[in-house]
Image (tube, rainbow, N blue to C red):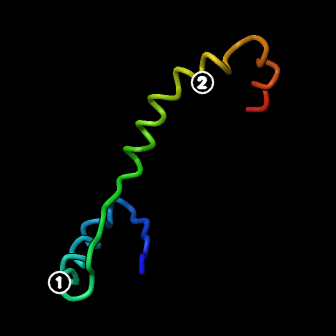
Amino acid sequence: MIIQLEIDDSKKDIIFNIIHSLKEDIIKKYQILDDKKENKDFISISNPSLSKIWDNKEDSIYDKFL
């Protein structure tokens, strides 16, 4: 069984302590994913390309809807 949790950064230490205490008997494996890093990486790669595509005179009519 896989359980996925989304934890607020301010509460992560509490959750880590709980996982650590359960690790030997109950939890076989756990993985910590930092989605913020993935989002930042994606944004830093995509923004320059998207700005060239969408920030132009042809599409300026749609800018008022943003």
Is residue 20 toward the left or the right of residue 5 in the image?
left
* Residue at the image position 35 percent from the left and 53 percent from the top: 34
Identity, as a three-letter code, of the amino acid under mark 1: Glu
User: 48 above or below 46?
Assistant: above
Identity, as a three-letter code, of the amino acid under mark 2: Leu
Question: How crowded is the residue under tag 1: few (<14 C-alpha within 10 Å), some, or many (20+)?
Answer: few
Residue 24: image tag: 1
For mark 1, give the secondary structure: loop
Question: How crowded is the residue under tag 2: few (<14 C-alpha within 10 Å), some, or many (20+)?
Answer: few
* Quarter of the rendering occupied by the N terminus: bottom left
Is residue 1 toward the left or the right of residue 21 in the image?
right
For mark 2, give the secondary structure: helix
Q: Which residue is mark 2?
A: 50
User: 30 above or below 42?
Assistant: below
* Residue 65 at x, y percent in the picture: 78, 32
* Residue at the image position 60 percent from the left and 24 percent from the top: 50
Q: Sequence-wise, which precedes: disc 1 or disc 2?
A: 1
* Residue 41 at x, y percent in the picture: 41, 36
Residue placed farthest to the right in the image? Answer: 61
